[in-house]
Amino acid sequence: MAAAAVLVAVVVIGGYLATMYSQGPISKVAAGPNVQVDAYPPGTSLPWAYAQGTVQGVQPSVAVGAGGQVYASWIGYSTSSPQVNPSSSQSFRTQILFSASTDGGKSFSAPVEVSNSTSSLSYSCFDPSTAVAPNRTLVYVAYACYAEGGFATSIMVATGTEGGSGQFNFTQRAVSVGLGFNRPWILTSKAGGVYLTWDSSYALYWATVRPNMTIAKPSSNAFSTRYGWITGAALLPNGTMAVSAYGYSDPTPGSSSVSVIYAALTRGSQSGKLGWSTVANFTVPTGMYIGGADSFVPGPALTVAPNGTPYVAYATDAGRSLMLTWLEPGKSAWSGPVVVESSTAGIADSPALASNGNGVVVVTWMGNSTGAWDAYASAYQGSAAKLVGPTPLSSEPGFASGPMTWHGDFMSVEQVGGSGFVAMWSDGRGLSDYYGYGHIYSSVVSVT
């Protein structure tokens, strides 16, 4: 596709509070053992999503509870041949799966279905986002689904409650239906509010989710470019939601300069139209989004530090460089950028971000500079202006790089514990098929 104009937007919603703790200057980023998140215990009677045939785990989304519990949702391809027919978005059936960890990401429960596999409304589901209520009694997963026989998509929210066996049971509800809906992101405030944002390629939508999982009529704002795609969302300490997205002018292969915009979406109450307000601008030179098999997701990834500083990571120079920048509270100009990764031989794809209470930001991404796709992590500490890494997260080589290689589009990373972060990705483990037939893997990343 054409080069992406990237924008970060902000809307007013509930608050957020993060735990603060002391930590000295960082010197090392270490990866823990790889854990297969979507594995079933031996002898388990597999649910339909596995029993139907080959399953591919892609696009993981991680949330962490106040007690260090790790919750993950992802897409499971449930047909015997998950290949997508280019002429139809409904030539395959997918569902949203979920797993939980009570030991900080060292092991995970057997996957359960989030979406209702027997519902015509949930014929093909994608784009999961995971959140947890402050009291940890509820887990939320937002996602989009094609209805069987139709082209409109439903934005779904599923509520998960923990059963006596430690497994979660989910109830899904459609909260909005429209043409071209994609990438819902769900967030919860410290006060228990549930908030949702998504896009329709042309506009950004925002709504409050009521306790019965319905929403009022959503507000929307058109992207400043012809097309847009949300790539992240996070809450600021003052109750504002930051949203990162990229935009592009025309969905054809090519390259051009990329304008990166930090904007504010404001409103006086929970109802009424949102309003755009530009805060800062900067330009990413020769950013490129290439259509087809060679496409990559340039970001921007987003995290918000406890002091309210939004950090954004994005790929530039046709994906050869991965950059990190941030906007300090009260400032109008972005700091940096810091070059996290630069390679003439590979692409830095699908960046993800997380931060802790001591100004440490962890950047993860999928890279193929070695000739194989693998997951990587670096850490940046602003107070010391210090970058550590990159460190490979994959304990085994990823699948071979090539023109038909695909690895699921997205990574996810969140803080778990004082100096720990749990990273999650889709990994084909040596397979070179375009669709990978991969599974979801994770690693606990320690920053010391």
Image (cartoon, grey):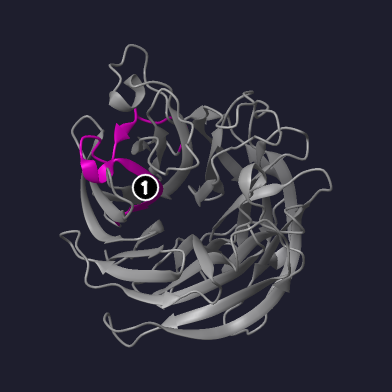
Q: Residue 267, position in %: x, y? A: 36, 85
Q: Is residue 106 magenta?
A: yes
Picture layout, residue 286 above or below residue 403:
below
Picture layout, residue 140 above or below residue 39:
below
The image quarter containing residue 330 is bottom right
From the viewer's side, name the closer residue of 17 and 202: 202
Q: What residue appears at the point 20 percent right and 40 percent down from the top-left corner?
A: 119
Residue type at the position of mark 1: Gly
From the viewer's side, name the closer residue of 344 and 224: 224
Q: Along the horizontal axis of the image, is 357 left or right of 94? A: right
Q: What residue appears at the point 60 percent right and 25 percent down from the top-left corner?
A: 429
Tell which residue pokes out farthest to the right in this image: 344
Is residue 304 something one can see in this rendering? no
Q: Is residue 37 magenta?
A: no
Residue with the mark numbered 1: 67
**Secondary element at image label 1:** loop
Picture layout, residue 368 above or below residue 42:
below
Q: Residue 437, position in %: x, y? A: 52, 27
Q: Which residues are magenta?
A: 105-133
Q: Residue 304, position in %: x, y? A: 52, 66
Is residue 186 something one can see in this rendering? yes
The image quarter containing residue 30 is top right
From the viewer's side, name the closer residue of 232 and 259: 259
